Amino acid sequence: MKQRIGDLLTQALLLAKDELNISSPPPIRLEVPSLDVYGDFSSNIAISLSERLKKPPLEIAKIIIDHLPPTDLIARIEIAGPGFINIFLKPSAWQEALREVLNLKDRYGSSSGNGKKVLIEFVSANPTGPLHVGHGRGAAVGDTLANILSFCGYEVKREYYINDVGKQMETLGRSVYLRYLELLGRDIEFPQECYQGEYIKELASDILKNSGDKYLHEPEDKVIEYFSSLAAEKILDEIKINLEDFGVFFDCWFSEKTLAKEVRNIIDWLKKRGLTYVKDGATWFATSRFGDEKDRVLIRANGTVTYFASDIAYHHKKIERGFDLLVNIWGADHHGYLPRIRAALMAMGYDLERFKVLLTQLVHLKRKGKPIAMSTRAGKFVTLKEVLKEVGRDAARFMFLTRSIDSHLDFDLELAKEKTMENPVFYVQYAHARICSIEKVATKKGISFPNLEAIDLSPLNLPEEIKLIKLLAQFKEVVKEAAQFFEPHRLSFYLTSLAGEFHKYYNKYRILGEEREITQARFALSQGVKVVIKNGLRLLGVSAPKEM
RNA sequence: GCGCCCGUAGCUCAGCGGAUAGAGCAACGGACUUCUAAUCCGUAGGUCGCAGGUUCAAAUCCUGCCGGGCGCGCCA
């Protein structure tokens, strides 16, 4: 609808171009005003043209309106304030918009034709321990964004990068090994830099159960290496299960291990271009030439390759795989890493416009308003698994998605369980369940409805009904903007307000039991609401229960 | 010290160039013999951190300052 009204204004500008003395019409920006008295749509075009045309805005507005092509959509137009053009639509225009929702059903809000290939890399937690709540936020954001982009016609792949190489892997192996020795009665002083969590002990105990003390007699290096890969594999399996329970599925689990050859190649490539040098026995990449604050090591003095070097190779490979857009979702604690990866991409001649990093801010876990102390060092942190078990998938996902990613997130376990608006997931789901309930009651009472296409929508004229349809019509834009700005939280807020409008309507008016035409039309309206809530929740990865 | 994010109602947060700044929670007062009260209605609550600047128009953009978080490894 917004599109159609915008087109009308553009046409008017085109028709008025001689009188206004403009060569080509500027793009029209329409907004939905905050107040109803300002109309259904409002445009500031006259004000913004005023300076360029050296004419008062009111005069320009008048000229534009006078050239508006005839249309059935618009009831009246007002010029208000400093020169806003406020447009009031006929109810029939909104009824048409509802018709579109009902016709398109689960496709309503989707768009196609874009076809761009996008790779979204997210979570990518090291396989050295269980996922915690912070990872949950990344998972919810990444997965939802992937849903939204794919709904908007992008070809989306979800990827998890497994950092299964490096010192941390050794540390993991050593941690398990030491716990293993401990279980065999050795007196061990467990080092601080080792992984402290209980899960390490469990891994050690599993090994003991299966293999007894046989690793006591083998060379330590070998055993640690073996324990390391065994532990990483088990932890990763656990991570996969957690994510599936969270409704998150990846197209690709990309192992850093498989990159060894590419890493050498890319380092050689950088060397050949004179972008590297040797200092203090290490090989450095001159990232500072590409905006980084200092140069970075690729090969350590001890000959091993850094995480950064692998990551360059990894991103090189992403580019080679032919994606039009690369999206990475990182915890905000990694933001310092951004300039060097940008530098690497620049050095490889990659267009940074096609590389988007979303930084999700920290999550603070709380219980009844009191912070839950967490320390990775001491291995005491609340895992994603525990959160899911306590609050459930729907509440957890919605909670993560009702904040913009730039904002720190207070996740209160008690509030997430309570059925209050602190966590609006139930509020939105309830609206859906109510509509389903109306259907059930109708059946029970023997009220039958013709196909939705056959229902006359013209009885929908109440302000509340028009307001509801206006919201339904906005869904398209909300989805598009969520995709354009990579901001999934827009959807959650939208759904909450749509559910709110429906609850109000439901309390004030009856859907069933009115005279036939009204009941049918109201039923169709509630079906429209149901369609949109269902589509929205689906994008968020939240269920739409039929009853609660 | 430098970099990034945040600072909006008592609390948790939306809004990020438009006309009278919103929502929920908490507080207070109402509405279930009627499609699920996990709901709704009403009251109250704000110099949008501070100071300048740009603009017809600033919570929104720019600069500086103040406060909070995070990051500044040959860790990942």
Image: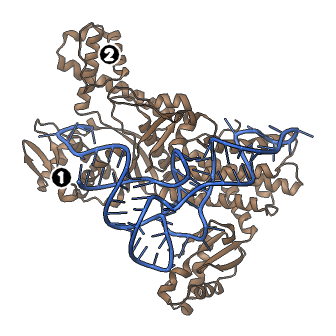
Chain colours: A brown, B blue
Percent position (x, y) of residue A373? Answer: 41, 31
Residue at image point 16% right, 52% down: A270
Camera-side residue of A220 and A189? A189
User: Please, is residue A151 above or below residue A207 in the view?
Assistant: below
Task: Categorize mark 2 by other alpha carbons within 10 Å: few (<14), some (14-19), many (20+).
Answer: many
Residue A93 position in % (x across, y down): 72, 68
Secondary element type, mark 2: helix
Quadrant housing residue A440? top right
Residue type marked 1? Lys
Is residue A456 shown left or right of residue A537?
Answer: right
Drawn side of residue A494 relative to residue A142, left or right:
right
> Which is more foreground, mark 2 or mark 1?
1
Name the side, left or right, on which A26 lies relative to A357.
right
Q: Which of A270 and A286 is in front in this view?
A: A286
Q: Name the residue under label 2.
A: A204
Chain containing mark 1:
A
The residue at the point 43 percent across, 57 percent down is A116
Relative to A540, is A131 above or below? Answer: above
Whether residue A137 is visible: yes
Q: Residue A294 carries which label?
A: 1
Residue at 25% x, 34% y is A165
Q: Nearer the viewer, residue A250 or A341?
A: A341
C-alpha gap between disc 2 and disc 1: 41 Å
- Same chain under badges 2 and 1? The reply is yes
Instruction: Examine the rendering and report whether any part of residue A153 can be seen.
Output: no
Q: What quarter of the picture does the N terminus of chain A occupy?
A: bottom right
- State the image coordinates of residue A335 (x, y, percent, origin top left): 32, 48
